[in-house]
Amino acid sequence: MSYTLREHTADIAVEATAPELGGLFGAIAEGLAAAMCESVPTSGGDRFEIECRAESVEALLYEYLDQLIYERDVRLVLPVDNEATVQDPETPGGEWRVTASARGVPLAEVTAREIKAVTYSEMVVEQRDDEWYGYVVFDV
């Protein structure tokens, strides 16, 4: 899995690919962390878990990233080393689900800039050949 930060007018975007959908979610979350911080400590911080549900894969990615921003604000940590598993609906019209974890580096230990929010603007989540592709714009 990999991600790239992309300039986007006054905002910042993350473009990522991964062989599995959970890996794509994790890569975009890593891109979010990189957009907030120039250098991420390789140690320190405690892991925490989150779970989100939504009616579509795009809404699920939005909820997941929004939850990471919420955790940053409530726990005062930078979520890094993100791992995610995505389950598609078992029945048509059912809910998508992500179970994930991240290591929360205390914000006092890093120099971070604020990412205000995740947006639906230009969001893409799709399977391309044998990998997943994602593009997400964040409001800075």
Image (spheres, rainbow, N blue to C red):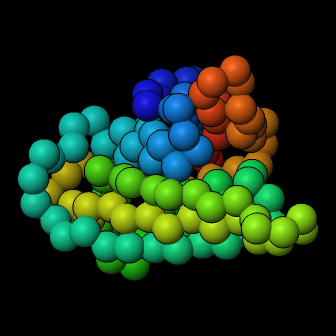
Percent position (x, y) of residue 15? 57, 29
Work out whether residue 92 or residue 105 is closer to the camera in this orientation and state it. 92
Residue in the image at 64% along x and 40% along y = 136
Q: Is residue 23 above or below residue 61?
A: above
Q: Residue at x 31, y 73 (%)?
A: 48
Which residue: 37% across, 65% down? 101
Can you give x and y, in whole percent of width and height, for residue 135 in the image?
A: 65, 34
The single residue placed furthest to the top in the displayed view is 129
- Residue furthest to the bottom in view is 74
Q: Is residue 109 visible?
A: yes
Q: Is residue 112 left or right of residue 59?
A: left
Please say if 89 is above or below 5: below
115 horizontally vs 74: left or right? right
| Residue ranking furthest to the front | 90
The quadrant the N terminus occupies is: top left
Residue 107 appearing in the image: no
Count of labels in the image = 0
| 117 sits left or right of 70 in the view | right
| Left-right relation of 99 to 102 | right
Residue 35 placed where, x, y %?
42, 39
The percent coordinates of residue 22 (x first, y second) are 52, 49
Quarter of image, res 77: bottom left
Residue found at the very far left of the displayed protein = 43
| Of 118 and 26, the residue lying toward us | 26
- Residue at x-position 37% and y-position 39%: 34
